[in-house]
Amino acid sequence: MDALPQHPLAIARDLHGLSQSGLAEEIRQAARRRDRRAGTTKQQVSVWERPGGRVPDAWFQQLIADVFGVGHDRVTVLGWPYWLPGNEAPTALGSGTTVAALREAQRRAMLNRRTLVGLAPAALAALAQQWATLDPALASSAADGRPVAPEFVTWLESSVRHLTGMPTVDRQHSAQLLDSYYETVVGLLEKSRCDQVTEARLFTLASSLAQTIGWHRFDHDHHAAAGHYWSAALHAAHQVGDADRGAGVLSDLAYQNIWLGQAGTAIDVLDHALSRTQDATARSLLHLRKARALAMNGDARACRRDLDAAEHALDSATTAPPAWCSWMSPADLAVDSGRCLIDLGESGPALHQISQGVALLPDARDKTRAVFLTYEAESLLRQGEIDHSASIAGEALVLAQRIGSSRCVRQISDLAPGYEPHPKVQGVEQFLSIVRAWHHQEAPHGRRASASTHARTADRRAAHGPSGNALRCGRHHPATL
């Protein structure tokens, strides 16, 4: 069983070998060194580490930074909790950093921690700005090591296409294989000799692998690792001048920020992505995700403007889209438009859009279907159709469990509070029992399993369903295919 998501402060403590009591003592000592006193306790540290818990004030952050040896400029620039050790900012784009970024993503993933945050918004915004303004240039080939046969690269490309093209229900079993291919490709880039064309193919393959592995990590709540893999994918795409792929990676990073409730950062990143991509289908997806972020911010006019732009771009597409957005279809446009309408408080029209999109969705896209069904269930719940909603939610939950995505299961289980006042309605108790069983499995010692639930407390207070029950489930990714 995966560990429960960890707060970055808990990760930083682990890296320094400190218990909560030990950190409290170190903070008290840091205050004494400044001729001050700090009555920090284990309980106070525990409160800081809770999902959605209280943020330490500037004085305590200064003391914590002293304990961990972190410069106060980093504290100011990145903000809490992104400056903490173990949550390093991504490597800046530039010549000579790509292979290091690819390897760093792998090192970060070895920590195998389910985390509550991804990359620091300030660092991500800077990375997106660099991508939008720096001219890409191929790096020089490695000067030593054995040569790489182009035929071997062709075999690698074919094998990876086969793995990433598997049905969603089977793809959950491919994580270790993808990791091994990633290790092979990065090793070749580090140690082997190859001509410029072959090297460019390896960087493209590394970008594709990093992007796919990032989604594996994201689907299991390893948000920091996912962010670093996507950062590495952006480096590799930029290295070979593939602007459309780079825009796709930025889109994934923006989507993660939407999931984590950071709509403003997502909008900034998507604006940079739109500045350089020309493919019509890619632009449609970028506008659609931007509309989603704008809807979260309550900006109805701007949201509809980007929805119109997404529809126009998809209708005008005449060439084959890049592989990373080849799945984009009218079904995605319809359902995401409905998701935006839910956020804007228009549940009736939202249900029509979502139902229409679900009907159009191909059978092979199980993960997307689970997400879309969750939207449909939420719309029905808001309309007061409790029995129909519970049936749809149960179907989505079983499907999400079958494909092995804890992220999607969390999203569906977040609907549970809306059903609790209606235990006698057909299907409700069955759905709630499945949710309770999952929570019990995730949190055997009585701890709450859904970190995303805590993180979205403010959102859920703002969005009320039948009988005043808080509902919020607007986290999805149609590209999980």
Image (tube, rainbow, N blue to C red):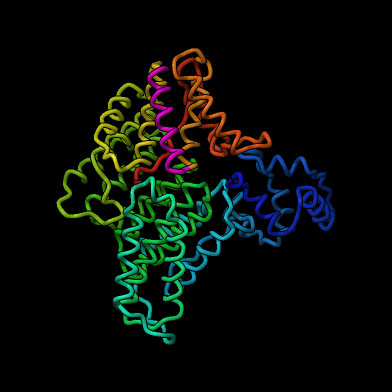
In the orientation shown, which residue stands out farthest toward the left?
318
Q: Is residue 334 left or right of residue 139?
A: left
The image quarter in which residue 358 lies = top left
The residue closer to the viewer here, 418 or 366, is 366
The image quarter in which residue 39 lies = top right
Residue drawn at x 51%, y 64% as measured from the top left: 106
Q: Is residue 58 left or right of residue 293?
A: right
| Picture coordinates of residue 194, whole percent (x, y) | 35, 82
Residue drawn at x 31%, y 76% as measured from the top left: 198
Q: Is residue 251 above or below residue 161?
A: above
Q: Is residue 9 left or right of residue 276?
A: right
Most common SS among magenta residues:
helix
The residue closer to the viewer here, 241 or 334, is 334
Does residue 324 appear in this view? Answer: yes
* Total labels drawn: 0
| Picture coordinates of residue 373, whole percent (x, y) | 37, 31
Q: Is residue 391 magenta?
A: yes
The residue closer to the viewer here, 331 or 472, is 331
* Magenta region: 387-405
Q: Is residue 311 magenta?
A: no
The residue closer to the viewer here, 462 or 350, is 350
| Picture coordinates of residue 240, whole percent (x, y) | 33, 70
Q: Is residue 320 above or below residue 431?
A: below
Residue drawn at x 29%, y 59% as measured from the top left: 244
| Picture coordinates of residue 226, whole percent (x, y) | 48, 54
In the orientation shown, which residue stands out farthest toward the top?
424
The image quarter in which residue 275 lies = bottom left
Q: Is residue 12 above or below residue 263?
A: below
Does residue 120 appear in this view? Answer: no
